[in-house]
Amino acid sequence: MLKFEQYRQHIEDLFAAALKASDPAYAVRSFLHRNGRFLQIGDAEVDIGQGRVFLLSVGKAALPMAEAVYELLEDILYAAAVISKRGGLETVDSRMSESSAVQLMEGSHPISGEDSIESTARIIDLLRQTTKDDLVICLISGGASALLTQPFVSLNDWQSLVQALLASGCTINELNTVRRQLDSVKGGGLARMAAPARCFSLILSDVVGNPLEAIGSGPTVILSESPAEALAVLDRYEIAGVLNHDVYRRVIDGLMEQAKDHEAGPVNTAVNSEIFIVGDVKMAAQAAMARAIDLGFVAQIITVHLEGEAREVGRFAAAIAKDTRPGRCLILGGETTVTLQGTGLGGRNQEAALSAAIALSGWPETAVASLATDGEDGPTPAAGAVICGETVPYAVSKGLQAQEYLDRNDSYHFFMELDYLISTQKDRPDLSPCLVVTGSTGTNVNDLLFILTYEVAAG
């Protein structure tokens, strides 16, 4: 029989299964197969004996994805370049690190830094060598938008713009609409630079619905969108009122310059680019569902297209939980947003969990968890949080007012203080700590939200 007291362990089991299914190296290996001088990429067969092979890997999962290809093509690889988030190269295989053909680089995330620009410049230099007989394999994962960048405005202006958009509550698709119009490597820019070589992209998706142009801002996706679409996003979220006047003017000037180029027509239309999704949140959710069934739950995936304001999603999850029969596991995948109203510390998953805890207050034998598959929820060390119907009543009994923390976007400090009380006072053995800390998971396929219901104990 499923026991409510084990809700934390059940959540950890489900999350572990989801992460295993999202393993970047496994995703790449299952998609690439070599037979001598021929490489099977999805349903395409490429003769790798005709020209040189270039490997580019960018994102939070850049290293494990690159290592999977390196194992397969080490003997014929002409050059490789990897840009990982800072700290993402700590486990690099010695063969790759010692290879003269491989450049291992790091960049800043979620806001691009000088290191991101310098690393991208080295990739651009590498692509200047390509010919029509060459093959370029691009591996793209979450975080690539910040790590792979050559903006048309200064770095300071670029950072200010992205920070303003991240705080505005806009979706990742809208943020990347703006990025694509102000960055030479986005919106197909990388594929144009790789031309005339044939370019194959293997993508580990971190964007709801897998829109190719939004994942990493679509570096190998040829688009026909215009700067007017970026301007519409800036107007919609009133960015002019947030940015310094001079910064906003320079951003608009940059968009106007791109508008002129757009009217003149594409610089290079001879691009041979093919794109494949090798992993996404749906695969992760399916693995979690299979594990839930093994544990004894009746499990169901509700959606893998979850979007919206995190606190609204939290309330929605609580409402679903209240209408769900005991012994169920409901799984939702996607990615929410947070419109900053306060100066607290948190992330979208912790905010959703705190909102759910408030709405679920006092509800028996029910747990909700919201977790980031990359292990990084906002600028905090947590992946997210697990709550139950007793979370807020216990917090109130200790003088913690959950709504006040939510109002100032301070979910991390709420859960941190509550976890300290749970672990030190030990007066509620039925309650588990809320924060889930995994460290970087090496993958990134959006977020997962779990709802678990249990039989109410008699008496």
Image: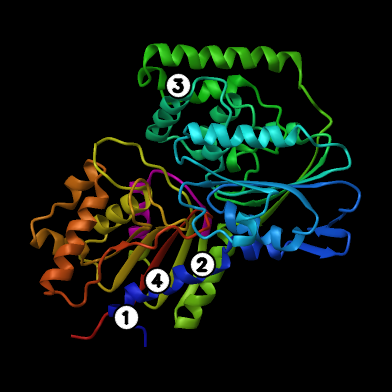
Describe the element under mark 4 as helix, strand or loop: helix
364 versus 90 height, above or below: below
Q: Disc 1 marks which amino acid? A: Glu
Q: Is 364 contained in the magenta span?
A: no
Describe the element under mark 2 as helix, strand or loop: helix
Mark 1 or mark 3: which is in front?
3
Quadrant in which the N terminus is drawn? bottom left
Q: Residues within 10 Å of mark 1 (few under 14, many from 20)?
A: some
Disc with the residue nearer the chain's start (1 vs 3): 3
Disc with the residue nearer the chain's start (1 vs 4): 4
Circles 2, 3 touching at the beta carbon (< 8 Å): no
Q: Is 305 contained in the magenta span?
A: yes
* Residue 212, position as x, y percentages in the image: 65, 43
Disc sitting over residue 455 in the figure: 1
Q: Disc 3 marks which amino acid? A: Asp
Residue under label 2, please give it.
18
Q: Which residue is drawn at 70% across and 17% down?
A: 262
Residue under label 4, please give it.
12
| Alpha carbons under labels 2 and 4: distance apart | 10 Å
